[in-house]
Image (cartoon, helix red, strand yellow):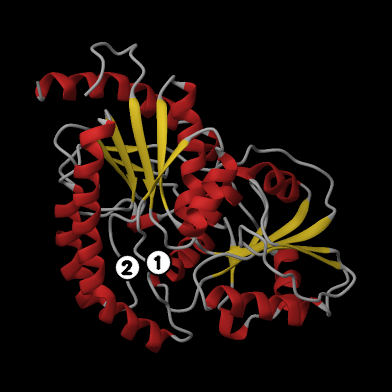
Amino acid sequence: MSGNSPATTRKVLVAPLDWGLGHATRCIPLVKSLLGQNMQVTLAGEGACETLLRKEFPQLSFLPLRGYRVEYGRSKLELMGKMLWQIPRLLECIDEERDWLAEVMKTEEFDVVISDNRYGLTHPDAFCVFVGHQLLIKTSLGDIVDNLLQPFQLDLINKFNACWVPDLPGIVNLAGDLSHPENMPRVPVSYVGLLSRLVKKQKPAEHLLVVISGPEPQRTIFEEIILEQAVHVREKILVARGLPGDQALPAVPPHVTMVNHLSAEELNEAMASASFVISRCGYSSVMDIARMQKKSILVPTPGQTEQEYLSGHLMQYGMALCFAQEDFDLVMALRYAGEFNYYFPPELEEDLLTEAVQQLHTVAANQERATT
C-alpha cells in the first residue's frame, strides 16, 4: 500500500453492483466525498452502470469488471424460478471478482476498496468496506430460504474490514429491519446516512415526475403502464426512463415529455419542481426522494420482496404512498396522494457520510502498518 501518513493521498477503488442503476447512483455522493478528502478514486463496472458513472466522473479512471448480470422474470413465479437457477452463477461471480481484485492489486495497489453489494471484493492488503442497506436479505424465495441465507451473507460481510449502511442509525429510518436486523455483522458497522446524489431544494410545481428504473423486463412493463394511463391525466408529466445512452424514444401524448436519462443535476432540478414523484420502491430512489422530502407514489417491482417490504415500512411512517403494480391506477393514486398525510423526519438532514470518509485516512494507515 502507498504512503505513510493520514495526509497521504489514498488510492481508492469504488465498485457498485449492476442490479439496476441504484447501486451506481448512490455511489455518486460517496465518490464526491472521497474526492473532497483528497483521495484518488478509480471506478469499476460494466454496462449501464459504467455509462452512468463515466458521464458523472469523466475525469476518473475506469476498470472493466464483469457484473452479475441477473435475469428477472415477468411474474413472481418466473422470478423465483430464475433466481433459484442463477444462485450457482452468483456464487461464481463472487469468486471471480475476488480473483479479479487479486490481479488488479498487483499493479494498482489500492489502499481502500469500497464495494457496493459486491461480496467478493476483499483483499488482505487493502482496507475493504462493504456498502449495503440490506443486512437482512428478503428474497422472493420465502422465509425459509431467507433465514438460511442470512448467516451465509453475514459471513461474507465479515470478510471485509468494515460495513457502511446507507441509512439512519435511530428508530426512525428508511429501511427498517433490513438495515437494523437482530443479527448484525461482527465487523464495525457505521450508519452513513442517505447516500443521495441530490441536494434538497424547493421550486414551484411544474410537472408530475415519473422515474422509471430497475431491471428488465419489469422496467419496460412499468413504463408501458405509465404511458397507457398518462392520457387520463391533465397535468404535465416528465418521464425519465432510466436508460443511459442513445435509445429511441416512444411516441407520447403532447403533455408528456420523455427522456432516456437525467444526470444528477438534471434530476435534482426535475424533482425540485415536481408536484409528486412516481417511482419504483428501489432503495436508492427512496433515498433520493427522502433527501428532497418530496411527496411520492411508489410502486414496488413485482416479486422483489425487498421493495415490497420497504413499501410497507415507508407507508407505516407516512414517508411514501405505495401501490401494487398489478392494480395500479394513476388517476386514483394521484387522488389518494392529494389526501395522504406525508411525514418527513428531521433526521433526514443529518450528514453522516463525511465523518466515515474522513476516517478512511486513519484506518488505511493502520491497515498499512498491519500488513508491512
Q: Element at badge 1?
A: helix
Residue beneath disc 2: 138
Visible residue check, residue 174 = no
Type of the residue with mark 2:
Lys
Report how far apart the C-alphas of labels 2 and 1 lie in the structure: 5 Å
Q: Are marks 2 and 1 in contact (CB under 8 Å)?
A: yes
**Residue 337 position within the rendered picture, expressed as x and y whole percent measured from the top left:** 70, 65
Q: Is residue 342 left or right of residue 153?
A: right
Q: Can you name the residue that lies furthest to the front here?
A: 107
Q: Tell me the number on the disc at residue 151.
A: none
> Looking at this view, is 103 or 86 the one in front?
103
Q: Is residue 219 above or below residue 341?
A: below
**Residue 35 position within the rendered picture, expressed as x and y whole percent measured from the top left:** 47, 26
Q: Is residue 328 left or right of residue 124?
A: right
Q: Tell me the number on the disc at residue 306.
A: 1
Q: Is residue 325 above or below residue 115?
A: below
Residue at 39 percent across and 87 percent down: it is 78
Type of the residue with mark 1:
Glu
> Looking at this view, is 43 or 147 the one in front?
43
**Residue 38 position within the rendered picture, expressed as x and y whole percent measured from the top left:** 44, 19
Task: Indicate the quadrant where residue 354 lies.
Answer: top left
In the picture, which quadrant includes the N terminus? top left
In the picture, which quadrant includes the C terminus? top left
